[in-house]
Image (cartoon, rainbow, N blue to C red):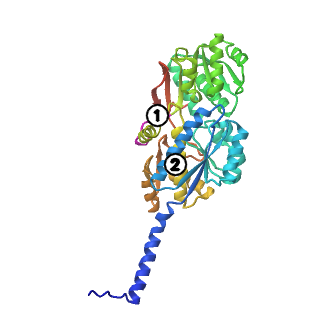
Amino acid sequence: MTTRSLKTPVQVASLATATAIALALAAPVAAQALEVKIGAIVPMTGDLQAYGETTLNGVRLAEKEINAAGGSVSVVVGDTQTAPQSGVDAAQKLVSVEKVSGMVGALSSGVTIPIAQSVSAVVGVPQISGASTSPVITTLEDNDFLFRTVPSDAGQGVALAQVTKERGIDTAAIMYVNNDYGKGLADSFQAAFEAMGGSITQSVGFEKNLASYRGELKNAADGDAEHLVLIAYPESGQTILRQSLEGGVFSKFIFTDGLKAANLVEDLGAEFLNGTFGTTAKALETEGSKHFHDAWVAEYGAMSEKPYHDTAYDAVYLLTLAALKAGSSDPVAVRDALRDVASPPGEKVGPGEFAKAMELLAAGTDIDYEGAAGSQNFDTHGDVAGTFELWEIQDGQFVTLKVFEPAAM
C-alpha cells in the first residue's frame, strides 16, 4: 500500500505563490490576444468598385493570417460607394456603432479627406489609407489621425513625367477627374514635366459619371499634342477612352494608377490600348512582398493586376500590431503606437510573421514592420516614401517594365 504525503502549510503557501508568479508571467502573453476590431471603408459600389473588391481581399488576407497566428482581429466593412457623403456615413457607423479601433481606407482621396476631417480627426480614430495619394493629405488638418501606406502623388507626378520624357514625348495634354486626387496628380505631373523641358498644351478637369465627355475631349485636343495623360477611375475613364477613339480625338494614352484595370482592355480591345503605359506605386521585391504574393495566390488563385491590395494588407497588420504594442484597443492608444511599430529602431518583422511580432512585443522588444508594399516608416505627416512601377499594356496584358525611385526635383 502506498502512502501519500500531505503538503505542509508552508508547501501550500509556496505552491500558491509559485502559481501566482506563473500567472503574472503569463499575463503579458495573454494580453497579446486582445480583441481588435478594424473598419474597412472601401468602395463596394461606384466608380472604384473593382478596386474595392481587391482591396478588401487584401484586408481579409491579413485578418486570416493574423488570427491563424494567435491574434484576435475582426473586420467590419463600410461601403463608401466612391462618394464623399456615403463614405462619411459609412465611417461614422463604423466608429459610433461598431466601435472600431481603427479604419483602413478610403481609396479615393476625395472620400478619404472628408472622412478624416469630419470623423477620424473629430472622434479620434486612426485611419490608414492604402490608396489615397493626393498631395493635399500631407498638410491636412487631421489631428494626426490620418496615415497612408502609399506614397503621395507628389512622387508619382515626377515618376510619370520622368518615364514620359524617357520615351521621347515632349508634348502632352491632360484630362483629370476633378477632385483632390485628379487635380493634385495633374498639377504634380505638369510641374515636373515642364521642369524637364516638356510642354502641356491643355489641362482639363472633368466630373465623374457623365454620359458624354466630348466637350472636354475637344478642349483637351486644342493644341498639337498626340498623347493624352488621362487621370481617371475605370468607369468614367472607359467612357472617355471610348469617345476619344470613336471620335478620332486621341489614340495615344498615358495612364496613372487609377486606370490600371484589366476590364478596360477587355471592354475596349487590346488593339486600341497596346503600347499605353503608366505608373503605379509599387515596392521593390523583398521577402515580405514574396510572402504576400504567395499567400495571395494560395488564397485567391492568381495575383491581381490592380494596385493597393498590398497597402491595405499592411494597414491591417500595422493597426493590429499598434494595439498589441499599446496593450489596448483604445483608438487613441493605437494611434500613438503606430509609428513605434512601423519605424526603426526595432527588430524587423514582416508579412506572415505576426506570431514572431507577438513574442517580441510580449518580451518588451521594439519591432519595425517592413510591409508587403515596402517600408512603412510614417513621417510627421503620416506619409511614407516609396518607389513606382512603370508598366505597359502589351498583347492586352499589363507588363511591369521596371520599379524605380523617381529623380529628385
**Hey, which residue is sitting farthest left in the picture?**
1
In terms of image quadrants, where is residue 47?
top right
Q: Secondary structure at mark 2?
A: helix
Q: Amino acid at mark 1?
A: Met
Residue at the (65%, 29%) spot, across then down: 182
Magenta-drawn stretch contains 39: no
Which residues are the magenta region? 282-288
The residue lying at 53 percent from left, 49 percent from top is 318
Q: What is the number of the mark on residue 122?
A: none
User: What main secondary structure does the magenta stretch of the protein show?
Assistant: loop
Q: Where does the image place residue 185, in percent across and percent down from the top left?
A: 62, 30
| Mark linked to residue 303 | 1
Query: Relative to 360, is 374 above or below?
Result: above
Horizontal side of residue 375 vs 218, given as left or right? left
Residue 63 circle label: 2
| Quarter of the picture holding the C terminus | top right
